[in-house]
Image (cartoon, rainbow, N blue to C red):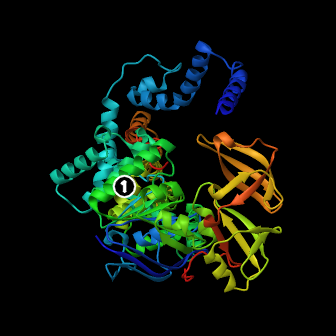
Amino acid sequence: MSIALIRKKGLKAGLSHPASAWPTGALRYLIAASFTGFCLFPFYVIVTTALKTETAIFAWPPAWNFKPTLQTFYNALFVFGGRSAVSYLINSVIISGVSTFLAVVLGAMAAYGFARFFFAGKRHLAFWILSTRFAPPVAFIVPIYLMVQKVGLLDSHIALIIIYTAMNLSLVIWILRGFFAEIPIEIEEAALVDGYSRLQIFWRVAVPLVRPGIVSTAILSAVFSWNEFLYATVLTQSRAATLPVYLAGFSNSMGLAWGEYMAVGTIAVLPILCFTFALQKHLVRGLTFGAVK
Amino acid sequence: MPRIEFKGFSKTYPDGTRAVTDLNLVVEDGELLCLLGPSGCGKSSTIRALAGLDTVSDGVILADNNRIDHLPPQARDCAMVFENYALYPHLTAFENIAMPLRARRLPTPEIKQRVTKIARILRIEALLGRRPSRLSGGEKQRVGIGRALVREPAMFLMDEPLGHLEAYLRVELRAEIRRLQERLGITTIYVTHDQEEAAAIADRIAVMSAGRLQQVGSFLDLFDHPINRFVAEFVGEPPMVFLPVERTGTDSIAIRGIQIQVSERHRTALRAMKDSELILGVRPNDICVGAPVPERLNGEVTLVQPQGDHAILVVSTPAGQTTVVAPLDRRPDPGTTVGLTFACEGLHLFDSTARSLNREDGDG
């Protein structure tokens, strides 16, 4: 014990020594702040451009001092091209939300099966699921377009929901399988002798214990569905079009309305940002600590 | 409370490991039976099969003469305590204990009352609001025992429940387990590799080795009348000493030419058998240390371990190394040569198949 302690201390001392070569105090914060600023600058430009008037947008040198106006927000959201951005926003929320929910629920069940049960061809099946992501999505765009057209689901929410769910599933399954496998098996055996069925154990014991995994895969799935452009632009026109499709539409015909474009861009970032922040507190380690030994 | 019976129970795991072979064992109603054996002897496999966590490869398990080996775990009414506690980490101690009751959809006030009652018995009332990560090992296992007992199960299975605890806690908790079990009269199977624990807690002990049941009986039964060399060696501390002996006549034996006095019973047994290779077993307490004389087995004391009221000596003799228990005040110094004599009542003889010749019935 004492030897281990000394070793640990020695190791710490050894590690902290080169660390003294790193900048300290104010300098450290200065470097961190400038890097953060560098990363956030594009986002700053998006937001400020959205709040500037047309003349302020094109002013050179850039108008750092300007009077924010909500007029452009209003224009972008409610009157652009006779259609409101709100409907695109709603489409995005529905499609991302439902596909994320389905991918996580179905994926968690599949992952639990892979982690806990033995069946013939398990490894091949798992590999096949992963392989669904090997080819670039654009390679399938024509067959999928034809299939969607055949079943009459063009420009519908359900087509994109199915496609996004399928695309997210392999990711969810592979990530969650590792999380489920890490739950000590004795906890579930204890639940079995306590009188719970497998399905009850899944919901009441296994899922709460992989909460961080569920949350991270939910965030990844939601971000993917929210930002997906290729399938959205090919399979939808207006009724089910999502925000990326709407954003892309700005650059044609009558030039670019920068203020409105940036306003919608801001709106497109905010929901996913809020979603991630809201879930972030569940990304904690060590949920199974203290269960065994 | 049911009487549990294993009939020809065997367990082979999918990878081909044979864990248990042809186990026939009865656990009487309300009895506390210890399964004792070294790790890998099949004792855990046996209770896992009883709990329904593993399938039965062969044979049947009966509870009050009804087959239960085909039932799912939740239908068997077994409660189990695990060596590594296996508490639900996301739930408080209260919710952990309440889980079996919630599975049975009991009304909330009754759950509260029963959990509180069991917590009072186990003296963990103050800890009910804590998560397992904030409990010590002993506290965790108390919660584990509470979770098992709260629903008043038909069977109580404990898989080395005290294995991870410190020595003083083990002694304290095992007494508590025994008290609770007697009070509730629950048929209990207790798995352990610690013979002292088994001796302290069990009505009867079943000794297993390499997947086979060796002997069932009270601790004294096993200690005084071990059926074979394995039980003789495994039960008793310090372990029995074994020395090869040669036959010098139809009913006499010797170690390296030194005649050994044997009892009448042994003489009868010897006359009835032909084996020339025999093993003599003797408890270290039944060996006396004296002056070295030619007609005794002499040896050099190589190690002296004082133990409080006695000393354990390791003596190197021509027939092999032996352990001897000597009184503390008359212990020889290391390096001295001593003569060993054996109390003839304490001798055990084992034939070439390691079976004991001490048993009169000889059936085993």
- Classify the position of the C terminus of chain B by image quarter: bottom right
> Looking at the image, which is closer to me, B327 or A114?
B327
Quadrant in the picture for residue B28: bottom left
Q: Which residue is pictured at 53% across the width and 68% down the height?
A: B207
Q: Judge the density around disc 1: few (<14), some (14-19), many (≥20) Cα neighbours within 10 Å.
A: some
- Classify the position of the N terminus of chain B by image quarter: bottom left
Q: Is residue A15 left or right of residue A127?
A: right
Q: Which residue is pictured at 66% across the width and 72% down the height?
A: B349
> Looking at the image, which is closer to me, B157 or A290?
B157
| Residue A289 image point, x, y percent | 47, 44
Residue where numbered disc 1 is placed? B178
Q: Secondary structure at mark 1?
A: helix
> Looking at the image, which is closer to me, A101 or B21?
B21
| Residue A82 image point, x, y percent | 30, 47
Q: Which residue is pictured at 66% across the width and 78% down the height?
A: B267
| Residue A291 image point, x, y percent | 44, 49
Q: Chain of mark 1?
A: B
Amino acid bearing label 1:
Arg
Determine whether A68 is above or below A123 in the image: above
Looking at the image, can residue B151 be seen? Answer: no
Looking at the image, can residue A64 be seen? Answer: yes
Quadrant in the picture for residue A50: top left
Tell how many labels: 1
Q: Which residue is pictured at 50% across the width and 81% down the height?
A: B57
Determine whether A200 is above or below B6 in the image: above
> Looking at the image, which is closer to me, A152 or A137?
A137
Q: Is residue B315 left or right of residue B32?
A: right
Q: Is residue B25 left or right of residue B298?
A: left
Seen from this angle, which residue lies furthest top? A26
Q: Is residue B251 left or right of residue B125?
A: right
| Residue A199 image point, x, y percent | 35, 66
Quadrant in the picture for residue B282: bottom right
